[in-house]
Amino acid sequence: MAFSPDLADRRFGTGLSPRVDPPSDPADILSRLAAPDDMARRFPIPLTDAAAPTVADLRALQRARAESDAAEEAYRAGRQRMEAVRLATFRAHLARGVETADGFRERLTQFWADHFTIRARNGLMRHHVTPYVEETIRPHVAGRFADMLRAAVTHPMMLLYLDQVNSVGPNSPVARDGRGLNENLAREVLELHTLGVGGPYGQGDVRQLAELFTGLSWGIDQGFWFRPRYAEPGAETVLGESYGPDASLDEIHRLLDDLAAHPATARHLARKLAVHFVSDDPPPGLTDAMSAAYLASGGALLPVYEAMLRHPAAWLRDVEAGPGAAKVMQPLQFIQSALRGIGARGETLLSADRQTTMRHLMRPLLHMGQDWERPDGPDGLPEAAEAWITPQGMAARIDWAFRAPVALLDDLPDPRVAVHQLLGPHAPQTVVFAAGAAEDRVEGIGVILTSAAFQRRN
């Protein structure tokens, strides 16, 4: 199947735009991805160290409140500032997808953030999730998987999410304090992040890896640090390879590099990418080509994307590819693509107040089934259409389509024009007719956005 510009933006990007030309071929998609990150410059998101108020600030306010009722107002003000930062990073994330000429980068950032998914376990760190993505995922989406793996696995937010900060080597000097070994991080690294479910590892590997990870920690005052006194002494053996003679950050990095280079990791990542972007049941030829590109390049991700984008299966539309190919947009993708297609401006989204953000953007996501930055578990979001096309989820999408666009845009586009802006040259005639027959622009835009043709990315 030949390359299709409209399919490129809908399947591999954040949707068609009336202001941004779609890519002309796979090489154009990849060149945009390899270019400087213009959206990060235009819509900046603070990194963890710059996300104010800091956890130390909030803890101090919390302690003051516990000591005196007079500090209650200051504590509430601190929590409100924290929530304001969280909403600002959410708006910036949406704005990037609405304005970008490099939709593949935005989609890859979302994909890999879900692959290395986290959730703020501490209520004082909810505004640190997007900064985690900004510093561990986004810089590496066009680089080496091993670098992304290192950054994500050792990041404080991951260590806190999977309780790694409470893991203690059973034979370490501080083992007597009652804390013990925690296997959460080790299990997820093997099962979700690298080798995959059913990969070539056993419980012994999980245990040994968990012992190797002891010492990884974070503190309010110290930030990330490696604590030798908490680490299990002696070498650990994972997948037949010895790491030691004692646990250290260097040996953990070596272990992560080895996992990144493993053929099982190549297969796992290739299939996961193909399922997300192309089909719930991708053809073996596609995943084989992607896996081979990963191994041949030493874990570089650009060659993997190129293998996917140049494979004929990547450009089959759902009616041609058969069952499992009709990928439904997840809620965030639905809202982002809808706003992009009707001509919303990123700067307008960025300046939205709290009430507008909650009523028309964040709360609808929750009603559609995607609670922003609060996944149900470490395995991330489901891919199957049935997970999203539920009675409640569809009711929320319909409600949003008829209410939010007119609330967020000063002037809605003519539905007779917008139907082609949103669906491209292959817009079904039934939708074209319905958009043209609508009584007003609100109804016409709503009809387009709630059509099956728009809900699918194919």
Image (spheres, grey):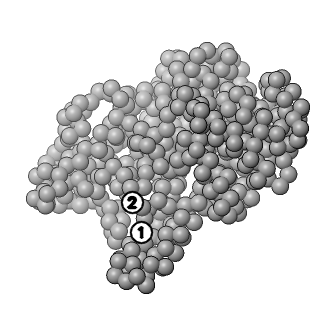
Instruction: Please name the residue that numbered disc 2 is placed on.
Output: 122
Determine whether, in the image, residue 192 is placed left or right of residue 285.
Answer: left
Residues at circles 1 and 2 in contact by the CB criterion of under 8 Å: yes
Q: Which mark is residue 234?
A: none
Q: Position of residue 309 (x, y in %)?
A: 62, 28
Q: Residues within 10 Å of mark 1 (few under 14, many from 20)?
A: many
Q: Residues within 10 Å of mark 2 (few under 14, many from 20)?
A: few
Q: Position of residue 146 (x, y in %)?
A: 41, 42
User: Which residue is more in the foreground, 272 or 101?
Assistant: 272
Q: Is residue 5 above or below residue 54?
A: above
Q: Position of residue 46 (x, y in %)?
A: 55, 63
Residue at x 32% of width, y 61% of height:
218
Q: Quadrant of residue 274?
A: top right
Q: Position of residue 127 (x, y in %)?
A: 50, 61
Q: Quadrant of the C terminus?
A: top right
Whether residue 269 is visible to the viewer of this picture, yes or no, is yes
Q: Is residue 254 above or below residue 41?
A: above
Residue at x 24% of width, y 38% of height:
206
Whether residue 242 is visible to the viewer of this picture, yes or no, is no
Q: Report helix, strand or loop for mark 1.
A: helix
Determine whether, in the image, residue 310 is placed left or right of residue 48.
Answer: right
Residue at x 33% of width, y 26% of height:
198
Q: Quadrant of residue 160?
A: bottom left
Task: Specify the amino acid type for callout 1.
Answer: Val
Task: Specify the amino acid type for callout 2.
Answer: Asn
Determine whether, in the image, residue 364 is placed left or right of residue 222.
Answer: right
Q: Gap in Å between the C-alphas at discs 1 and 2?
A: 10 Å
Q: Quadrant of the N terminus?
A: top right
Q: Earlier in the sequence, mark 1 or mark 2?
A: 1
Instruction: Please name the residue that numbered disc 1 is placed on.
Output: 55
